[in-house]
Image: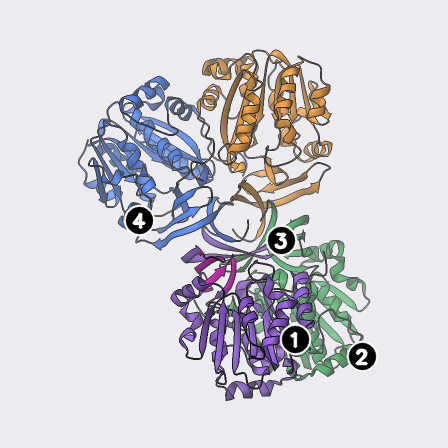
Chain colours: A blue, B orange, C green, D purple
């Protein structure tokens, strides 16, 4: 560590990941959270919310492709998609890559954050905000879902800050919320949420997992290392009909071709790797 | 970060992973390297060489099972196994789980380190040092291999410090060394090496990968997140006959059963997940 | 910051001082506190209590001479001296340099700590523990003072951990305790306490200062930068008769000569410098 | 250390001072140096050059008053004053407090830095830049002095980055430069320079001290703890006629009154304290 500015992130209760800052674009507080847009050495421009790196230029594709495509590909014809959170627009960008999507609604509570993303993070949204199929709603995700009619969406993607890192996201990891998500999904619908990390925070992770299990008949979990997070990020799928683990490598590749989806990391092989990879709950020693 | 002792590890050129220390068991220098045995918060007792965590109680199984079993299972009948490095004895422990193994030779340059492992790290070796099939040789791996007759081993496992982190391991990542490894392998032999990290150190990683490709007809790569490393650890397999990617999930499970191998994370599904997972070379931005 | 072990110390609520560790001699918990004896780069062997560096080989003389000699020199004939705390023996060492001292009682609550100091920190005590004039008592300072007869001591030196850093010392910074100290002092007695730092912790500092002012007619304060603390350490003198600020440079030098006191930094000029230097309470911005 | 942005400063070769960042105002590179203007927790707005905190809202007065007033008060009638460096304008501000000053020339090499100070650091200059007695010159200090006629100035104040921390300042700590400073001083002139830290960097410090001693007949040194530097900052005075150590407390107070100088910390007592305080060269252990 030489002199200079660094960003410090809690990886776990007793460990930290520290990255050198190249340039600070923005440090502010919105009504909901601390927002920093910072150029990091090695990672490029990054969005940091309440001190946690959410997305960085160098590796955001790892996170966003792993979050979005497994459920999108598992559903045979996702037409209406809801994204809860995802203010930087990269999740929306990945969803819209699927040509079958007719409407993608992104609901983020933090309108200021979305404006910052438009202004400073165009490599994230890459124009997705301006796609005619995109609908951006500034609202509390819980309230939006509550007001929503039943059986509306094919896919719901929940892209929030970690369940243990911030207050604003907590109510969106509850059994009640997942029941509401089920209600607004069509009968063959599917949802996914990012779920923090199951190794360091197994209690919270298992709480979320069990909440999803209590609502959805088919539940699958996977994780993927995201370098700028300092850990493998966990994801949990809740599905009403289709099983992501039953989608073969070839079928994934065929669907991506049909729907014209170009990715950097996601593929049939990656899909299989994710769904077959063991997820570890907690540390084996205290 | 509260007050106290911390261990600082370079994850990449511009980022650090910092872990709280609970207790320091040993800090010393052997003839070859700085050795620390430290009890870390969340990770338990850990072996640190030249400042890099090599193995920690809470997650060493993730590393050692991912290193050892894919090649062991790919080979239909590994009887003679050579381990280069691996001084803490955990790689040896995993190898000896395979009942078909008749002899496992572990060659580590650092006799003092092996003594420390015997004394302070019994959860690592778990008695493997005293298994009648184990042969511990204190010698330079390169010299040992050079003196070795041809076509001796079924499997060679190279378990060294990272190719970019220390001087002592460097000559064991060269084309010349891999040619020697090939020479001492039987004609259907297989080898694996840990290879640091391909995301942060793609230049060195690709150098090692290409060295292996220039010697072995079948080359496979995979990575696995190891929490205490702060990153996913890469592994590269060089094989003369058998393709690890062609071993099915069921076959892996069958072999583990036949050979009486009990693991914490490795399984047929994990094997497939590892071999199908995409490895990322370098960051996409400068 | 390269890889390795570091000790992290809170300088203030929002700032840290981090020093590279060369070797760890001891990390343990006594009944009263966490004790670490560590060899630091640049500072040499150091005693760390509850995460705060108390004394380091390279600069302990700055602290101990600044603590002890101003009061010792202000009193014309200190014969009986009480040290509360000071377990590493360096305060005792400085007191015993004054040939007029007939008895120096050191009361430290932590007998294990005193044993560690005897064993590992001989450069601190330099044999002071074995001086026939020294009396080492393992007891709670407050209880010892309470049991003590009145008008016994010429000088009382209070050498504890900071008033804001640990629980065990807190009751020894109260008005009640200072009244007890006054009681056991002779009518021309004088006391001094280290008092943490008035810049970063002005509230606690002023609390201590006012407690002393409420008990002693003559109160003087001074501070001295101690490199390994990361800040200037404050000291407060409470005196019943003699004013340290009235002792001239020449008189200090004369007394040191008469009593055969050899120092590294303390002198008449230093005495004047300390007593005339302005102490700053708190930061001028929030 | 919680999550967030931190500024890391090297205090010595093996130790760091880390301060939490509240807000980043500016991070840029001028032609000469990296410039950061940052709001720090506890310290307020700070100017950081090449990673070293130069001045912070909460404690800049400690540094600037200690630098400027001892020489200004030692000279009986300073009328023309030269400041080399001091781009943030606070040294100029302190000089202009002396009503006897007719002209204060400030020469800083970095015009961009001076503009940033005007724009973002008005609490530093407090309007000094706009005082009719002030003359701001953007030039290399060495070149400006070389072009300057002889026997022009009463006082020269050298306010640069540390002799060991940056390249741009190095030639302004040489014997040759001090000879030039002497040439442009009147025959009773006096100069002062900040000189980094003599405890951690005694080699460089003694080099600077000896350079000044080889040119000036009267040399005095002192140091003052500056919290945001993480250490006591050393200063060295070179004088042609007047001895700062011979100016009494009362005389200092009288001069401050006569010249209408209001300060926060500097006074007759502080003057005496500084000039009598021992400066420590280097650590007593390796």
- In the picture provided, is C252 more to the left or to the right than B196? right
**Residue drawn 64% across the image and 72% down it:** D179
Query: Which residue does the numbered mark 1 point to in the structure image?
Result: C191
Badge nearest the viewer, 1 or 3 = 3
Circles 4 and 3 on the same subunit:
no
Q: Main secondary structure of the magenta part?
A: strand
Q: Secondary structure at mark 1?
A: strand
Query: Which residue does the numbered mark 2 point to in the structure image?
Result: C258
Query: Which residue does the numbered mark 3 point to in the structure image?
Result: D14
Circles 1 and 4: CB atoms closer than 8 Å: no
Q: Is residue B157 above or below residue C135?
A: above
For label 1, count other residues whose C-alpha is less than 10 Å away and answer few (under 14), some (14-19) or many (20+): many
Q: CA gap, disc 4 to disc 3?
A: 39 Å
Q: Secondary structure at mark 2?
A: helix
The circle on residue D266 is none
Q: CA gap, disc 2 to disc 1?
A: 22 Å
Quarter of the image where the C terminus of chain A is located: top right
């Amino acid at each position: 560590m030489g002199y200079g500015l660094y960003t410090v992130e809690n990886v776990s209760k007793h460990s930290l990941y520290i990255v050198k800052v190249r340039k600070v674009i923005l440090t502010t507080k919105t009504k909901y959270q601390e927002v920093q847009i910072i150029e990091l050495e090695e990672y490029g421009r990054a969005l940091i919310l309440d001190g946690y790196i959410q997305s960085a230029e160098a590796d955001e594709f790892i996170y966003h492709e792993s979050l979005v495509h497994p459920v999108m590909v598992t559903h045979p014809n996702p037409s209406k998609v809801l994204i809860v959170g995802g203010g930087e627009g990269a999740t929306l960008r990945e969803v819209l890559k699927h040509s079958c999507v007719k409407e993608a609604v992104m609901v983020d509570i933090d309108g200021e954050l979305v404006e910052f993303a438009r202004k400073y993070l165009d490599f994230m949204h890459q124009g997705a905000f301006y796609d005619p199929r995109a609908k951006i709603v500034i609202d509390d995700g819980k309230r939006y879902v509550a007001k929503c009619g039943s059986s509306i969406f094919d896919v719901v993607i929940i892209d929030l800050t970690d369940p243990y890192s911030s207050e604003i996201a907590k109510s969106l990891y509850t059994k009640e919320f997942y029941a509401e998500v089920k209600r607004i999904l069509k009968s063959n619908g599917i949802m996914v949420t990012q779920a923090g990390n199951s190794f360091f925070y197994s209690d919270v992770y298992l709480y979320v997992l069990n909440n999803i299990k209590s609502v959805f008949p088919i539940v699958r979990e996977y994780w993927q290392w995201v370098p700028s997070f300092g850990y493998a990020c966990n994801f949990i799928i809740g599905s009403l009909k289709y099983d992501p683990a039953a989608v073969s490598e070839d079928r994934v590749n065929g669907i991506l071709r049909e729907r014209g989806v170009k990715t950097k990391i996601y593929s049939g092989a990656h899909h299989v790797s994710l769904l077959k990879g063991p997820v570890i709950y907690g540390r084996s020693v205290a």
